[in-house]
Image: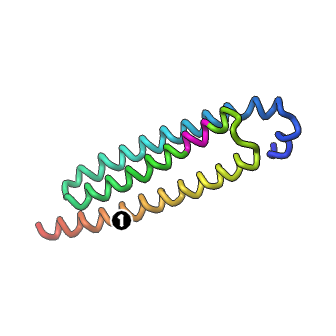
């Protein structure tokens, strides 16, 4: 189903918006859980540098989660038209990709720091 189809039939739009909102809220909860898991794993490494990295990753994922929840609330409340909803989803996907890339980069950084720590004996 395309957004144009939804625009033509408001009843279908009224049915699908709460579902989209619920999905967005679920994604936000998963993102927050992932941030907490990454934070716990990184903090277990024990170095001050890795704790700072974990904190930054966690804040980034939580910020995206907050944005998703706000976007989902707007969709569920009927505050966006289909074009705005499509743009919001595109923006969300881009933010999610950026956070995932940051996590990968920080994990590589943590791995390097752990190697340095183990080489120091």
Badge 1 density bin: few <14, some 14–19, many ≥20, Cα 10 Å: few
Residue 94 point in image, percent of width and height: 58, 58
Residue 1 point in image, percent of width and height: 81, 43
102 with respect to 96 (left or right): left
Q: Quadrant of residue 20?
A: top right
Could you tell me which residue is drawn at 13 percent across and 69 percent down? 120
Which one is nearer the viewer's eye here, 95 or 43? Answer: 95
The structure's colour scheme is rainbow
27 with respect to 104 (left or right): right
Which residue has dot 1 on it? Answer: 108
2 with respect to 50 (left or right): right
Could you tell me which residue is drawn at 42 percent across and 41 percent down? 33
From the image, which quarter does the C terminus lie in? Answer: bottom left
Q: Quadrant of residue 97?
A: bottom right
Q: Vertically, is 107 above or below 2?
A: below
Residue 27 point in image, percent of width and height: 54, 41
Q: Vertically, is 102 above or below 41?
A: below
Q: Which residues are magenta?
A: 68-73
Residue 115 point in image, percent of width and height: 23, 67
Could you tell me which residue is drawn at 75 percent across and 29 percent down? 15
Total numbered badges shown on the rendered structure: 1
Q: Farthest left residue?
A: 121
Whether residue 40 appears in magenta in the rendering, the answer is: no
Q: Which SS class for mark 1?
A: helix
Q: Main secondary structure of the magenta part?
A: helix
Could you tell me which residue is drawn at 67 percent across and 31 percent down? 18
Which one is nearer the viewer's eye here, 89 or 79? Answer: 79
30 with respect to 9 (left or right): left
Q: Farthest right residue?
A: 8
Whether residue 69 appears in magenta in the rendering, the answer is: yes
């Amino acid at each position: 189903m395309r957004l144009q189809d939804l625009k033509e039939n408001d009843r279908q739009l009224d049915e699908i918006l709460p579902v989209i909102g619920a999905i967005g809220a679920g994604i936000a909860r998963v993102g927050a859980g992932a941030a907490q898991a990454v934070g716990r794993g990184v903090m277990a490494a024990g170095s001050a540098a890795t704790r700072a990295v974990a904190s930054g990753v966690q804040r980034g994922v939580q910020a995206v989660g907050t944005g998703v929840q706000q976007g989902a609330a707007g969709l569920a409340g009927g505050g966006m038209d289909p074009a705005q909803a499509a743009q919001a989803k595109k923006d969300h996907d881009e933010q999610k990709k950026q956070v995932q890339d940051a996590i990968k980069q920080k994990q590589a950084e943590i791995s390097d720091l752990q190697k340095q720590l183990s080489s120091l004996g």
